[in-house]
Image (spheres, grey):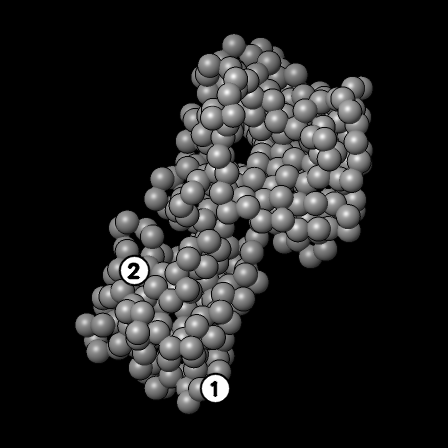
Amino acid sequence: MSAQTNSITDQDLLFMRKALRLAARGAGRTSPNPLVGAVLVRDGAVVGQGFHEVLGGAHAEVNAIADAGGRANGATLYVTLEPCNHHGITPPCTKAVVEAGISRVVCGMTDPNPDVAGGGAAYLDKLGIKTITGVLEKECRAMNQPFIKYVTTRLPYVRVKAAATLDGYIAGTTGDSKWITNERSRRFGHQLRYTSDGVLVGSGTVLSDDPLLTARLRGACRQPVRIVLDSGLRIPLQSRLVASAGESPVWVICAASAPSRRETALIDRGVTVLRAADGENGLNLHQILEELGKRRISSLLVEGGGKVLGSFIDGGMADEFYFFYAPKLLAGGIGMVRGGSRQKIADSVPVFGIKTRSIDGDLLVSGRFREELY
């Protein structure tokens, strides 16, 4: 059932915020499953807590119940996502809730999966366990935008990211781009990679920068799939991406007309080659996103260059952006976003939910291309 405003207490808000902080600790480890945190409270005190730590591992509710032990009996469970009531990789969490003797359940949001939405709350209500949903729902949904989009559309949630000078250039006239932003900003960029299933660039970026596209963070337990849009299979066989394909996956997406001998050479070096249909201005990006979704890429970070970013934005396929601006001016060079030209301000692409953050002098501007959350 949906929570009524007058039934939500200050204590409910307090402990749901704690559950949200716990959920965030699973970032980069649970995809394509959601981030979920859970807190067990009895007589106003926390008696157990947990979060979904890794894909295939115990869910947040089960971890919180294990942490509480016998103290879970009669407690209230605060959980950011409605407890599941179906068998997946793990047993249903509703079963664990009932067996632990929990007397009340407060959920941040219902499960967005159209096949199971509301099933967990309804099941618990039926058994007499008072259940409310919708406590800090916006915050809970915001945390799990990639999961919600993927489970409802089977398409990846697309973030676009670029680093530019204050006047909007990502490289000088020679193509030189190292380094525009400072080390802390670049580390933030690596965090974005770590929390994405895939990182995508165009062949121009590979030819000019020879990037690795890995998430170079201490303690990183996984790497994103590294994806290159390369219509003609121009990617050098000696590039760092191809050389490291045996360490973490590299997928190259080419046109149907790309030479088969180049495809064979890349496959022999451990690269996965996918062929896509042509679109209006290059490869068919929507078809590519559909294929990535089928391959369980639920979140995609598009790093460019400018033409690739422009294609995703022009095509309405970008969900979120992260633009880093360094306190430098080039007064000429390669633009950050190069898409279809617009003659009037009224034709510009609107953005929403703008946030700004200073990172050692660099400015990070982030936001959404959708007014409403998924």
Could you classify mark 1 by the number of other residues whose Cα lies within 10 Å: few (under 14), some (14-19), or many (20 or more)? few
Q: Is residue 273 visible?
A: no
> Which residue was labeled with disc 2?
86
On the image, the x and y values in percent for residue 31 come to: 49, 50
Q: Amino acid at mark 1?
A: Ala
Residue closest to the far left: 126
Tags 2 and 1 in contact by the CB under 8 Å rule? Answer: no
Residue marked by disc 1: 45
Q: Is residue 356 above or below residue 260?
A: below
Residue at 58% in and 11% down: 259
Q: Secondary structure at mark 1?
A: strand
Residue visible at 45% across and 59% down? 139
User: Mark 2 Cα within 10 Å, few/some/many (few <14, many 20+)?
Assistant: some
**Which residue occupies the extreme bottom position in the image?**
43
Looking at the image, which residue is at 67% across and 21% down?
A: 204
Q: Which quarter of the figure has residue 336?
A: top right
Residue projecting furthest to the front: 345
Residue 277 falls left or right of residue 105: right
| Quadrant holding the N terminus | bottom left
Cα–Cα gap, marks 2 and 1 = 30 Å
Three-letter code for the amino acid on which mark 2 is drawn: His
